[in-house]
Protein backbone atom coordinates (compact mmCIF):
# COMPACT_ATOMS: atom_id res chain seq x y z
CA UNK A 1 0.00 0.00 0.00
CA UNK A 2 1.52 3.37 -1.00
CA UNK A 3 2.10 6.19 1.44
CA UNK A 4 -0.91 8.48 1.52
CA UNK A 5 -0.77 12.21 2.20
CA UNK A 6 -3.98 13.94 3.27
CA UNK A 7 -3.29 17.46 2.18
CA UNK A 8 -4.23 20.45 0.07
CA UNK A 9 -1.79 21.83 -2.52
CA UNK A 10 -2.35 25.48 -1.47
CA UNK A 11 -1.61 24.88 2.23
CA UNK A 12 1.79 26.05 3.44
CA UNK A 13 2.25 23.18 5.89
CA UNK A 14 1.34 20.71 3.14
CA UNK A 15 3.84 22.32 0.78
CA UNK A 16 6.46 21.81 3.48
CA UNK A 17 5.81 18.05 3.47
CA UNK A 18 5.42 17.94 -0.33
CA UNK A 19 8.80 19.64 -0.76
CA UNK A 20 10.39 16.85 1.30
CA UNK A 21 8.58 14.15 -0.70
CA UNK A 22 9.64 15.74 -4.01
CA UNK A 23 13.25 16.20 -2.84
CA UNK A 24 13.59 12.43 -2.60
CA UNK A 25 11.15 11.40 -5.33
CA UNK A 26 9.25 9.43 -2.68
CA UNK A 27 6.17 7.76 -4.19
CA UNK A 28 2.88 8.59 -2.46
CA UNK A 29 -0.79 8.97 -3.13
CA UNK A 30 -2.23 12.47 -2.67
CA UNK A 31 -5.54 12.35 -0.78
CA UNK A 32 -6.64 15.83 -1.68
CA UNK A 33 -8.84 17.44 0.96
CA UNK A 34 -11.89 19.33 -0.26
CA UNK A 35 -14.53 20.85 2.00
CA UNK A 36 -17.19 20.04 -0.64
CA UNK A 37 -16.26 16.34 -0.58
CA UNK A 38 -17.86 14.96 2.61
CA UNK A 39 -16.37 11.51 2.07
CA UNK A 40 -12.72 12.58 2.11
CA UNK A 41 -13.38 15.00 4.98
CA UNK A 42 -15.00 12.23 7.06
CA UNK A 43 -12.11 9.89 6.27
CA UNK A 44 -9.69 12.60 7.34
CA UNK A 45 -11.58 13.49 10.56
CA UNK A 46 -11.61 9.81 11.53
CA UNK A 47 -7.84 9.69 11.13
CA UNK A 48 -7.11 12.95 12.92
CA UNK A 49 -9.95 14.65 14.80
CA UNK A 50 -7.89 17.83 15.25
CA UNK A 51 -8.27 18.16 11.45
CA UNK A 52 -5.05 20.04 10.77
CA UNK A 53 -3.18 18.98 7.67
CA UNK A 54 -0.96 17.45 6.32
CA UNK A 55 -1.36 13.93 7.70
CA UNK A 56 0.66 10.99 6.40
CA UNK A 57 -0.66 7.45 6.48
CA UNK A 58 1.79 4.56 6.18
CA UNK A 59 -0.14 1.30 6.47
CA UNK A 60 -1.42 1.14 10.03
CA UNK A 61 0.52 4.23 11.09
CA UNK A 62 -0.85 7.79 11.07
CA UNK A 63 1.76 10.55 11.29
CA UNK A 64 0.81 14.14 12.14
CA UNK A 65 2.73 17.45 11.99
CA UNK A 66 4.71 18.48 8.91
CA UNK A 67 8.08 18.40 10.70
CA UNK A 68 7.43 14.95 12.13
CA UNK A 69 6.26 13.67 8.73
CA UNK A 70 9.59 14.81 7.25
CA UNK A 71 11.53 13.19 10.09
CA UNK A 72 9.45 10.02 9.65
CA UNK A 73 10.15 9.89 5.91
CA UNK A 74 13.87 10.15 6.61
CA UNK A 75 13.71 7.22 9.05
CA UNK A 76 11.31 4.86 7.30
CA UNK A 77 11.46 5.88 3.61
CA UNK A 78 14.89 7.47 3.16
CA UNK A 79 16.05 8.76 -0.20
CA UNK A 80 19.25 10.30 -1.49
CA UNK A 81 18.67 13.66 0.27
CA UNK A 82 19.06 13.53 4.07
CA UNK A 83 16.77 16.37 5.14
CA UNK A 84 17.71 15.73 8.78
CA UNK A 85 21.51 15.45 8.79
CA UNK A 86 23.12 12.36 10.30
CA UNK A 87 25.30 14.42 12.66
CA UNK A 88 23.07 15.03 15.71
CA UNK A 89 24.66 18.41 16.38
CA UNK A 90 23.82 19.65 12.89
CA UNK A 91 20.38 18.01 13.18
CA UNK A 92 19.73 20.00 16.35
CA UNK A 93 20.45 23.25 14.54
CA UNK A 94 18.18 22.15 11.69
CA UNK A 95 15.37 21.55 14.20
CA UNK A 96 16.03 24.91 15.83
CA UNK A 97 15.65 26.70 12.50
CA UNK A 98 12.58 24.61 11.67
CA UNK A 99 11.01 25.89 14.92
CA UNK A 100 12.04 29.45 14.04
CA UNK A 101 10.25 29.32 10.68
CA UNK A 102 7.17 27.68 12.17
CA UNK A 103 6.77 29.82 15.30
CA UNK A 104 8.03 33.21 14.18
CA UNK A 105 7.28 33.32 10.43
CA UNK A 106 4.30 31.02 9.82
CA UNK A 107 2.38 31.59 13.07
CA UNK A 108 2.24 35.41 12.77
CA UNK A 109 1.58 35.12 9.01
CA UNK A 110 -1.42 32.88 9.64
CA UNK A 111 -2.68 35.17 12.40
CA UNK A 112 -2.89 38.05 9.91
CA UNK A 113 -4.62 35.94 7.25
CA UNK A 114 -7.13 34.30 9.61
CA UNK A 115 -7.97 37.65 11.18
CA UNK A 116 -8.79 39.05 7.73
CA UNK A 117 -11.36 36.27 7.30
CA UNK A 118 -13.28 37.23 10.46
CA UNK A 119 -16.32 39.47 10.65
CA UNK A 120 -15.21 43.07 11.23
CA UNK A 121 -16.64 42.98 14.77
CA UNK A 122 -14.54 39.94 15.66
CA UNK A 123 -11.19 41.21 14.41
CA UNK A 124 -8.21 41.38 16.76
CA UNK A 125 -6.36 44.57 15.82
CA UNK A 126 -3.85 44.29 18.65
CA UNK A 127 -3.08 40.65 17.81
CA UNK A 128 -2.54 41.55 14.14
CA UNK A 129 -0.25 44.47 15.03
CA UNK A 130 1.76 42.13 17.28
CA UNK A 131 1.96 39.57 14.45
CA UNK A 132 3.25 42.22 12.00
CA UNK A 133 5.83 43.36 14.56
CA UNK A 134 6.88 39.74 15.09
CA UNK A 135 7.39 39.28 11.34
CA UNK A 136 9.51 42.45 11.13
CA UNK A 137 11.67 41.25 14.01
CA UNK A 138 11.94 37.76 12.52
CA UNK A 139 12.89 39.13 9.06
CA UNK A 140 15.59 41.32 10.65
CA UNK A 141 17.04 38.43 12.66
CA UNK A 142 16.94 36.09 9.65
CA UNK A 143 18.59 38.69 7.42
CA UNK A 144 21.68 38.74 9.63
CA UNK A 145 21.72 34.96 9.84
CA UNK A 146 21.43 34.45 6.06
CA UNK A 147 24.31 36.81 5.22
CA UNK A 148 26.85 34.54 3.54
CA UNK A 149 24.62 31.46 3.72
CA UNK A 150 22.93 29.58 0.92
CA UNK A 151 20.60 27.45 3.05
CA UNK A 152 19.29 27.81 6.59
CA UNK A 153 21.83 25.41 8.16
CA UNK A 154 25.17 24.22 6.82
CA UNK A 155 25.75 23.73 3.11
CA UNK A 156 22.84 21.49 2.24
CA UNK A 157 19.08 21.81 1.79
CA UNK A 158 17.37 20.44 4.91
CA UNK A 159 14.12 20.16 6.82
CA UNK A 160 14.62 23.80 7.86
CA UNK A 161 14.55 24.88 4.20
CA UNK A 162 11.42 22.77 3.60
CA UNK A 163 9.80 24.93 6.30
CA UNK A 164 11.31 28.22 5.17
CA UNK A 165 10.16 27.81 1.55
CA UNK A 166 6.35 27.97 1.96
CA UNK A 167 6.41 30.08 5.11
CA UNK A 168 8.54 32.88 3.58
CA UNK A 169 6.57 32.52 0.34
CA UNK A 170 3.26 33.35 2.03
CA UNK A 171 4.77 35.70 4.63
CA UNK A 172 5.98 37.98 1.84
CA UNK A 173 2.49 37.98 0.30
CA UNK A 174 1.02 38.83 3.71
CA UNK A 175 3.54 41.29 5.18
CA UNK A 176 6.11 42.11 2.47
CA UNK A 177 9.76 41.56 3.29
CA UNK A 178 11.36 45.01 3.25
CA UNK A 179 13.96 45.41 0.44
CA UNK A 180 16.44 46.31 3.22
CA UNK A 181 16.38 42.60 4.13
CA UNK A 182 18.18 41.64 0.93
CA UNK A 183 19.53 38.35 2.31
CA UNK A 184 16.04 37.14 3.22
CA UNK A 185 14.65 38.16 -0.16
CA UNK A 186 17.52 36.41 -1.98
CA UNK A 187 17.01 33.28 0.15
CA UNK A 188 13.28 33.30 -0.69
CA UNK A 189 14.20 33.46 -4.40
CA UNK A 190 16.63 30.55 -4.01
CA UNK A 191 13.89 28.54 -2.34
CA UNK A 192 11.49 29.38 -5.19
CA UNK A 193 14.09 28.11 -7.67
CA UNK A 194 14.56 24.80 -5.85
CA UNK A 195 12.81 22.24 -8.12
CA UNK A 196 11.01 20.45 -5.26
CA UNK A 197 9.42 23.64 -3.93
CA UNK A 198 8.90 25.09 -7.44
CA UNK A 199 6.81 22.00 -8.20
CA UNK A 200 4.69 22.52 -5.07
CA UNK A 201 4.18 26.19 -6.00
CA UNK A 202 3.19 25.26 -9.57
CA UNK A 203 0.69 22.67 -8.39
CA UNK A 204 -0.91 25.28 -6.14
CA UNK A 205 -1.25 27.99 -8.83
CA UNK A 206 -4.90 27.18 -9.67
CA UNK A 207 -5.85 27.93 -6.06
CA UNK A 208 -4.34 31.43 -5.86
CA UNK A 209 -7.77 33.11 -6.08
CA UNK A 210 -8.44 31.51 -2.67
CA UNK A 211 -5.78 33.63 -0.91
CA UNK A 212 -7.87 35.78 1.44
CA UNK A 213 -5.71 38.91 1.13
CA UNK A 214 -5.50 38.62 -2.66
CA UNK A 215 -2.52 36.92 -4.27
CA UNK A 216 0.03 39.29 -5.84
CA UNK A 217 0.72 38.93 -9.56
CA UNK A 218 4.22 37.44 -9.13
CA UNK A 219 6.12 34.34 -7.95
N1 LIG B 1 1.25 22.22 13.45
C1 LIG B 1 0.70 21.75 12.19
C2 LIG B 1 -0.05 22.92 11.54
C3 LIG B 1 -0.83 22.47 10.33
C4 LIG B 1 -1.84 23.54 9.89
O1 LIG B 1 -2.14 24.50 10.60
N2 LIG B 1 -2.35 23.34 8.69
C5 LIG B 1 -3.38 24.23 8.19
C6 LIG B 1 -3.29 24.32 6.69
S1 LIG B 1 -1.85 25.26 6.19
C7 LIG B 1 -4.74 23.67 8.53
O2 LIG B 1 -4.85 22.50 8.83
N3 LIG B 1 -5.78 24.49 8.46
C8 LIG B 1 -7.11 24.01 8.69
C9 LIG B 1 -7.76 24.67 9.86
O3 LIG B 1 -7.15 25.55 10.48
O4 LIG B 1 -8.90 24.28 10.15
C10 LIG B 1 1.85 21.22 11.31
O5 LIG B 1 3.00 21.63 11.52
O6 LIG B 1 1.60 20.38 10.44
Image (cartoon, rainbow, N blue to C red):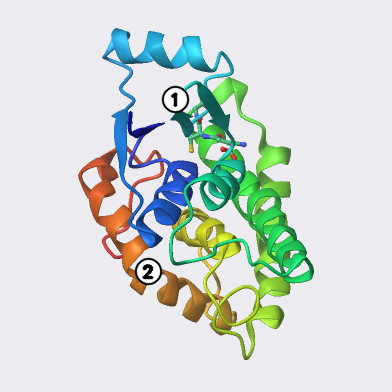
Above or below 195: residue 204:
above
Residue 131, position in %: x, y?
A: 68, 48
Q: Residues within 10 Å of mark 1 (few under 14, many from 20)?
A: few
Q: Residue at the spot x=54%, y=49% of the render?
A: 70
- Residue 34 percent coordinates (x, y): 30, 22
Ligand 1 visible in quadrant:
top right
Q: Is mark 2 within 8 Å of ligand 1?
A: no
Residue 110 in which image quadrant: top right
Structural crowding at the residue carrying mark 2, measured as other residues with C-alpha within 10 Å and reported as few (<14), some (14–19) or many (≥20): many
| Relative to 212, 102 lies left or right | right
> CA–CA distance between discs 2 and 1?
33 Å
Q: Between residues 81 and 92, which one lies in front from this camera angle?
A: 81
Q: Is residue 202 above or below residue 120?
A: below
Question: Which residue was labeled with disc 1?
Answer: 59
Say which residue appears at 77% left-offset and 62% top-offset: 92
The residue beneath circle 2 is: 192
Labels 2 and 1 touching (C-beta < 8 A): no
Viewer-nearest of discs 2 and 1: 1
Describe the element under mark 2 as helix, strand or loop. Answer: helix
> In the image, is 183 to the left or to the right of 211?
right
Q: Position of residue 205 (x, y in %)?
A: 24, 50
88 in relation to 134, above or below: below
In the image, 60 versus 121, the foreground residue is 60
Amino acid sequence: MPLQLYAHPFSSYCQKALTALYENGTPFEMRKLAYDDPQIMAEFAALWPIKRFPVLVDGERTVIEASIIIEYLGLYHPGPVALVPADPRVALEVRMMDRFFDNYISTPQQKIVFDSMREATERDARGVADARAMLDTAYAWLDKRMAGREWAVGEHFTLADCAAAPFLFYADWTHPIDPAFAHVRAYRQRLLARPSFARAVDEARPYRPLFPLGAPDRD
